[in-house]
Every structure is written in C-alpha cells, then in structure tokens.
Image (cartoon, grey):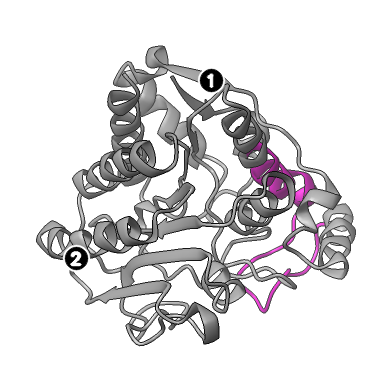
Amino acid sequence: MVTVYFGDGLARYGFGDGHPFGPDRLHAFWKETVHQGLDRKVEVAVPVLGRREELQRFHTRDYVERVIEQSVNGEGFLDYGDTPAFKGVFDAAATVVGSALDGLHGMMSGTQRKILVPIGGLHHARREQAAGFCVFNDPGVLIETLRAEYGVRRVAYVDIDAHHGDGVFYAFEEDPDVIFADIHEDGRYLYPGTGFAHETGKGAAAGTKLNIPVPPGADDAEFNRQWPRVEEFLRAAKPEVILLQAGADSVAGDPITHMAFTPAAHGHAAERLAALADEFCDGRMIAMGGGGYNRRNLALAWNAVLDALVKHAA
C-alpha cells in the first residue's frame, strides 16, 4: 500500500493567493486523485508537525530560530526576496518536513514502503537560509535523519523538477554516499543558474553526482534519451533508500519555466525508481511533489507518480 500525506496542515504551505506557490496546490492535486479513483487505492495519512530538533539535523539553529521569529509577525523575507515570511510560516514549513519524517519512520519500521508527500521536495533551501519558495529543505532533513537514526549511508536523490536542486546538491557536494541525479532546465536560462554537467561532486564525492541540464523546450523525447543515464548511475551505486523530487514545473505550460515534458515522464520516472527500490532498497522510496505552478499540470504529473507507485505496490 502506498501512503499519501494529505490535509490542511500541508495545504497551509503557500504564499497567498496570486503567488505561484499558493496554498491551493495540494487540493488541485487531490481533486484529480479522487477523479482518478486513486484515493481508494492508497492509505491517507494526516500531516505531522516537525520538531525544531529534527529541522536542526540539516538547518542551523540560528536559521530555525529566525523562521520562528518571523512566523509571529509574518513580515519580511526569509531570503533575498523570493521567499516571503507569513504568519504561521514556521508551522507550515515544519509540517512539510514532519510529514516526510513520519513517512520515513513508517518506512524504516516496515509498516510503510512507498510514500508520497505532495507538498514537499523543497530543494532550494540552504542550511542557513530559505531560497526559491523553499523554507526548510525536507530532502536534506530526510538524508540527515537516515544517517542519525537508522545508520543508512547510501541515499539516492533523484530530481526531475525544472529547477536544479541546488540546496541538496551543494549541501552534499562532498559527500560520497549521497547519490545525486538531476534532470533540469539548463541553468543559463533558469533559476538558480547551477547544475552544470561538469558538477559531479568534489573530493571523495567526485563522480557521485549526475547533473543533466537540458535546453528550454526539452520534451519527452529528450527525457527518454537522458533517463537511462539516471538508471545506470543508480544501479551502479546500489542505494539503500531512494528519494524522488517530482517537480511538475518541467511539464509543458508551466508559467515560470520553459520545459515541455508531459506527465508521462513523471510516471515513468516513478515506476522505474520504484523497481530499483524493490531491487536494491527493500522497496523503500519517498516521492515529494516539488515545484509546479500550473495547477492542471501538477495534478496530472503527481497523480502519474502516484499511479505508478500504486501499480508497483500491487
């Protein structure tokens, strides 16, 4: 059975009506889930508020305290202008992390195997500040928790969001046990301007990172040309857990990116990663929604991911 986190606690992570990352994104996804009948094939879990000490496995104490302070008055920005504070932002962002961690604990205890957290995959946040609509970096916290609580070393992080997952990449650029694979729009044309093919890790981690920048307009044909490189890379690494950031802003028609995937790319990535998780990771896989600012696109892409997980779990 696949576990999906859904509820008002997750929906609250958003920056107000009219903002690309608005609080309506979760319900746009779930409406399509119900339409496809997938809600009857999954276990629905209630969102969970993360604790300060859990956040500090990845983030600095000073930064977590600053988010708490700005959460009270809801004023200013948490970075240099992309990520505004709002009243309650700490609880909203901590619930994204707490829900992912709740799934992780269930997965590691054996009560769950494959998990989807639709509002998650906040891959731009740095250890010491927010960035690009991302307050806390839930993939980073998951990786650090796998090490601290479960002794897991080899974690594969795969990212198909249009934007490079820079907050994850640079945090673990010198870590040879984080296997990083990211297909994204070329940084010469899109925020954050990073993730070039020559960025493959540093020091002992050289060769453990795979960045695949693709040009604006890259479609499913380009995805299908590049995807086998990701599978080959992961297969050679033999990870213990797989994390997928399934950003839907790589689908054609997103208002702030320039790519042209269809939701079929997301479904294929999820299905193939689920197969690799079954082969190498005892089935352990967590998918996170990531970006996506066209509501129809994110609804279809994330449900393609969910459908692939459900079919693979059957």
Amino acid at circle 1:
Val
Q: Count neighbours of disc 2 (C-alpha within 10 A) and say few if under 14, some if 14 to 19, many if 20 or more.
A: some
Name the residue at the left extreme. 221
Q: In this view, does 132 lie above or below 304?
A: below
Percent position of residue 199, x then y: 41, 84
Q: Do the residues labelled 2 and 1 touch (CB within 8 Å)?
A: no
Which label was assigned to residue 44?
Answer: 1
How many marks are shown on the rendered structure?
2
Which label was assigned to residue 226?
Answer: 2
In the image, the segment drawn in magenta is 74-99
Q: Quadrant of residue 310?
A: top left
Question: Which image quarter holds the N terminus?
Answer: top left
Q: Count neighbours of disc 1 (C-alpha within 10 A) and say few if under 14, some if 14 to 19, many if 20 or more.
A: some
Identify which residue, 256 or 108, lies in the foreground. 108
Percent position of residue 196, x then y: 36, 83
Percent position of residue 240, x then y: 49, 48
Q: In this view, does 241 lie above or below 206?
A: above
Q: In this view, does 186 lie above or below 105?
A: below
Identify which residue, 215 or 258, lies in the foreground. 215
Numbered disc 2: secondary structure: helix
Name the residue at the top extreme. 40
Question: Which image quarter holds the C terminus?
Answer: top left
Question: In the figure, is residue 44 to the left or right of 48?
Answer: left
Q: Which residue is drawn at 31% across and 79% down?
A: 186
Numbered disc 1: secondary structure: strand
Per the model, the C-alpha gap separating discs 2 and 1 is 33 Å
Amino acid at circle 2:
Gln
